[in-house]
Amino acid sequence: MTSLHVHDHGGEGPPLVLLHGAGRSLGDWEAVGPLLTAEHRVLAVDLPAHGRSAYRAPWTFETVLRDIEATLDTYGVPDAIPVGHSLGGMIAALYADAHPGTTPAAVNLDGFWWGRPGQYPGAERVKEMARAAAGAVVPAAYPRQQAEYAGQFGIPYERAEAAARGAVRELPGGQWQTLPERAAALEMYDAMDGLDVFALLHRVPCPQLLVRARRPQPSMPGMEWFDELLEAYAKGLDQELARLADERPTATVEDIDATHAMLLEEPAAVAALVRRFLGPPA
């Protein structure tokens, strides 16, 4: 087991561990973390092979969970509530499922992946594109370009640029290595494809908050097929979440007026949803 790189936001109260998405870093939580410290001790971590955390082959969910366990033990908070975005939301559910009686709750922020194989036409194409771009070496202008693109979502330039820099490693000559590097990224995508997310969510034993991004992604010229995929996916996700809420009284489903990039777009709204779900410390 390996302790992960941590940003300790401080605070008092029931502990939280913040988990970021695939190809991102703990920097995505920089605006949200301080908004939770009035009621919670808040740690944010870089997942294995991301940010400043090491990669130990192979990248599997079992290894990730062990590394989170080791990190929480190091900080003396084995009962921390996992709060995850995207991939981090899936890991939050996995962690809660693996620690019944220890983990009191879990929060999943838009971590639903792309459904079962063949469920949504076009989803396999997205997965192929993600694999093709895995571990890419990108030019020196990459953080600036990412920050400028994020501007169309209303994300402040400084916040977006800092988050982009946290998700890459600088190379000699000014280029950047996107993380995880290719071998780890392909293993990570294999793990994600092999997880039946809704079967997992149906068996999580503790109360869980499931937050759905409702703001549509801006259309991209030449990618009309992606808009069609998102429309079908949104309808399917509505049905899956409604069924989960009906069958699991411990599951709370909430919407947020944001795109998938909610941590950077709407940090105050994200923090408010988490605080309301967890309630005041006992």
Image: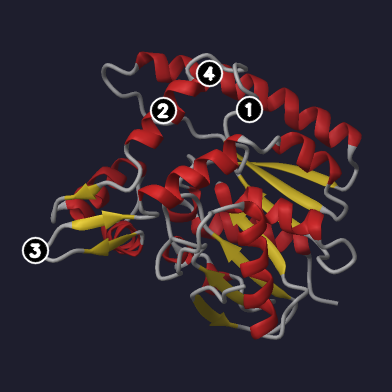
Q: Residue 31: x and y, percent?
A: 46, 66
SS under mark 1: loop
What is the three-letter code of the residue carrying label 2?
Glu
Work out how far the residue at label 1 is from the one at label 4, CA to CA, in angstroms: 14 Å
Quadrant location of the C terminus? bottom right
What is the three-letter code of the residue carrying label 4?
Glu
Chain-order first, disc 2 or disc 1: 1
Q: Are marks 3 and 1 in contact (CB under 8 Å)?
A: no
Mark 2 vs mark 1: in front: 2
Residue picked out by circle 3: 173
Q: Nearer the viewer, residue 91 or 276?
A: 91
SS under mark 4: helix
Kindly tell me whether residue 41 is visible in this rendering. no
Work out how far the residue at label 3 is from the one at label 2, CA to CA, in angstroms: 29 Å
Kindly tell me whether residue 230 is visible in this rendering. yes
Residue picked out by circle 4: 231
Residue picked out by circle 1: 115
Q: Residue 95: x and y, percent?
A: 73, 58
From what the image shows, is residue 129 above or below residue 26?
A: above
Q: Residue 69: x and y, percent?
A: 69, 71
What is the three-letter code of the residue carrying label 3?
Gly
Work out how far the residue at label 3 is from the one at label 1, CA to CA, in angstroms: 40 Å
